[in-house]
Image: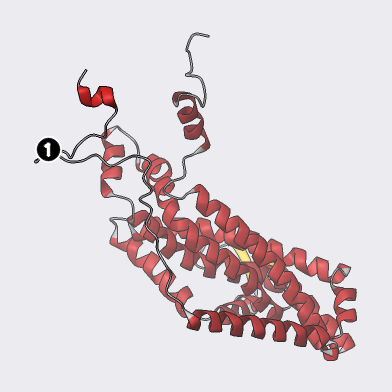
């Protein structure tokens, strides 16, 4: 042992050409100071003051008749209309998704006839207003007084119905909403399918998978990450779009609200009742949309994959089949 170490003297300067080690306990944290942003604070203050003023104006406004709002908020007539709105939304979205998937597959088909048919469908139903389509379906009896099933081209008919008896306000609403939504969903599904690498289809075909298996097991599961966000927006939009059904007396939330305020002349109060219920429905739908988006986000692993990873990571589980 050298005399320097025995005496406890401090080590001398490091020789030339060597790098002096930095103590590990030295604090190297950067001290970052934020620049003052008075404009942001002024904007926050203005927004807060406006929100407080708006809430105060609405709450204390005597013309809103909050007692009428509270009376009808859970009225049986309103709740029945709310149930119809939910039914229209769910059924129309389900049928619209089914139509959209079929039309999207037709648009990506190698057949020019199928591509032209699908393009004509999306062109027409996206190019005409939904309100016009609803009124058209409701007045279908003017064009086809009798709906029948049988041999086409004036052949014998097996069964027939009067159009006025079949096309009620609810049925016309379902037809208009579903077919219109199918045109939009077709574009959403097509964009999602085109976002998948073409090599995925080739890989599925190389192991002997049929086109239907490739579509259902390879293409669509990967396309969901692109499809889910716009689908959530379409679902929320559909909840509000059902209010257009009131023009054909579809018995939805907006329709029954109109019937009530036409009877008691409480227009603003009944509109507030309907608006509050629409806000509740869209809030629930938004929460569900965010949950589904997290489920299909690029960093999210499926539950089965998470369980497998937990069994493989030390300290988080036990490898399956390992000895106890």
**Quadrant in the picture for the N terminus:** top left
Question: What is the quadrant of residue 136 in the picture?
Answer: bottom right
Question: What is the quadrant of residue 77 in the picture?
Answer: bottom right
Residue 154, how many percent across, how many down?
53, 68
**Front position in the image: 169 or 197:** 197
Read off the residue under disc 1.
15
On screen, residue 208 above or below 148? above
Q: Residue furthest top?
A: 323
Residue 58, how many percent across, how many down?
77, 85
Residue 274, how many percent across, how many down?
76, 75
**Front position in the image: 301 or 151:** 301
Residue at image coords 54%, 52%: 292
Question: What is the quadrant of residue 235 in the picture?
Answer: bottom right
On screen, residue 260 above or below 187? below
Q: Report the side of 318 relative to 261 (left or right).
A: left
On screen, residue 54 above or below 24? below
Residue at image coords 70%, 79%: 248
**Front position in the image: 58 or 315:** 315
**Front position in the image: 157 or 40:** 40
Asked whether residue 252 appears in the rendered view, the answer is no
Applied colour scheme = secondary structure
């Amino acid at each position: 042992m050298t005399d320097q170490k025995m005496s406890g003297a401090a080590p001398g300067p490091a020789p030339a050409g060597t790098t002096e080690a930095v103590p590990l306990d030295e604090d190297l944290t950067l001290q970052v100071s934020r620049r003052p942003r008075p404009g942001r604070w002024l904007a926050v203050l203005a927004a807060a003051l406006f929100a407080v003023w708006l809430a105060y104006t609405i709450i204390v406004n005597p013309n809103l008749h909050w007692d009428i709002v509270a009376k009808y908020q859970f009225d049986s007539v309103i709740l029945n209309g709310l149930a119809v709105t939910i039914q229209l939304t769910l059924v129309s979205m389900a049928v619209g998704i089914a139509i959209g998937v079929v039309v999207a597959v037709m648009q990506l088909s190698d057949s020019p006839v199928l591509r032209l048919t699908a393009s004509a469908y999306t062109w027409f139903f996206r190019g005409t207003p939904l309100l016009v389509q609803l009124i058209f379906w409701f007045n279908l009896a003017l064009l086809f007084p009798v709906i029948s099933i049988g041999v086409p081209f004036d052949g014998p008919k097996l069964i027939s119905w009067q159009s006025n008896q079949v096309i009620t306000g609810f049925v016309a609403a379902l037809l208009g909403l579903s077919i219109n939504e199918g045109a939009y969903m077709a574009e959403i599904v097509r964009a999602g399918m085109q976002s998948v690498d073409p090599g995925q289809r080739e890989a599925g075909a190389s192991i002997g998978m049929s086109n239907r298996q490739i579509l259902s097991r390879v293409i669509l599961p990967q396309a969901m990450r692109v499809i889910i966000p716009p689908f959530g927006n379409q679902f929320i939009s559909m909840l509000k779009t059902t209010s257009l059904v009131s023009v054909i007396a579809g018995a939805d939330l907006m329709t029954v609200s109109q019937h009530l305020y036409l009877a008691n002349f409480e227009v603003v109060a009944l509109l507030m009742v309907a608006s509050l219920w629409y806000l509740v429905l869209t809030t629930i739908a938004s929460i569900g949309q965010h949950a589904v988006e997290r489920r299909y986000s690029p960093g999210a692993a499926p539950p089965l994959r998470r369980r497998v990873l937990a069994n493989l990571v030390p300290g988080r589980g036990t490898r399956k089949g390992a000895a106890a």
